[in-house]
Amino acid sequence: MKKIFLLLLPLLVACSSHTTTQNNTATFTDDYGRTVAVPTAPQRVVSLSPAVTEIIFALGADSILVGRTDFCLYPPAAASIPSIGGISNLGIENILAQQPDLVISGSMIPRKATDQMEALGVPMVCVIEKPHFEALYDNIRTIGHLVGREQEADSLIALLQQRMKLEINTQETQNQSNNLPSVYYVVGFGAGGNFTAGGNTFINDIISLAGGRNIAADIEGWSYSLEALMDADPDFIIVRREDSAAFCSSKPYNKLSAVKNGNVIGIVSGTLDLQVPRNIDAVIYLRNRFNQ
């Protein structure tokens, strides 16, 4: 069974960033604590993260995007950007072929690749996904700064915050915590083990904001026992849409009440497992499903 938990493991890391501007470059400290001299107005950007690519498009900066990975599939227009290949097996030559003046990576890029890019003189900064929902706004602001779209970033953040304020009554959700439906999010399942999002993840925050109670909120990391899942027998199961049928038909998951009652929610990839503006859509969608 295909697993996506490896894409999520680095979420536990969170660092701050800052810049010091001089001439046409700025000294930027990224989320891994690396200090990099970056251009203040980059014209050729390669994104090595689906989340970074999605945010760049949301900021209207896609005209300077000259490269992306095979996994950068949203929005659909991203398909028109040349792909440099995978993530874990990063093709340095493919990146260099795009002649970037800035490379922005995410949580999955190995340090070896980062060191290689640095040795080749190509500025590369890491913007990772972080444990809490509110960090989405910080990442949007950081990427907006890196690509010279600060005003657009502020506008996007204000829009997302307004949607949350208008459509989600967070305080009411918190006050009704004793009556919340129990929820389990499937990251991986089957013979290879069971994996979910623990309490120290932004996914846990999304479930809470949507009015659910994550049954794995008391764990850190991603591994979860099958016995604990079956004993908890949650009211709702959230799983990637493409994995929904396999999960529901597999033993012993088909014995769960959520499966029997039709409360397995197949969610579009990227809306919940990436830290992107579509997280707001995930909160609203899940809230509506929990309240049906």
Image (spheres, grey):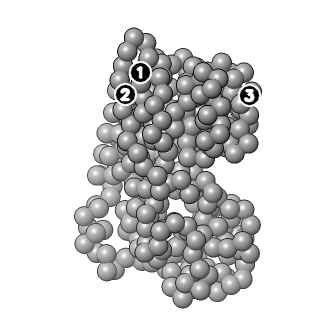
Q: Is 21 located above or below residue 243 in the figure?
A: above
Q: Secondary structure at mark 1?
A: strand
Q: Residue at x 41, y 45 (%)?
A: 15
x%, y% of residue 84?
Answer: 71, 32
Residue, x 67% and y 73% (percent of image)?
193
The first of marks 2 and 1 along the sequence is: 2
The mark tally for this picture is 3
Taking depth in this image into account, of 268 and 124 the one nearest to the observer is: 124
The answer for how far apart the CA atoms under marks 2 and 1 are is: 6 Å
Determine whether 128 is above or below 103 in the image. Answer: below
* Residue 143 visible in this rendered orientation of the protein: no
| Distance between mark 3 and mark 1 Cα atoms | 26 Å
Q: Amino acid at mark 1?
A: Ala
Q: Amino acid at mark 3?
A: Asn
Give the numbered dot on residue 161. Answer: none
Residue 74 coordinates in the image, percent (x, y) = 60, 41
Question: Which residue sits at x=43%, y=75%?
Answer: 218
**Residue placed at 31% from the left, 39% from the top?**
158
Position above or below: 17 against 265: above
Label whose residue precedes the other's in the sequence (3 or 1): 1
Which residue in the structure is indicated by mark 3? 94
Q: Is residue 256 left or right of residue 15?
A: right
Query: What residue did someone put label 1 on?
Result: 26
Can you tell which quarter of the image residue 188 is in?
Answer: bottom right
Tell me the SS state at disc 3: helix
| Residue neighbourhood size for the residue with mark 1, other residues' Cα within 10 Å, grouped as few (<14), some (14–19), many (≥20) | some
In front of the other: label 3 or label 2? 2
| Residue beneath disc 2 | 19
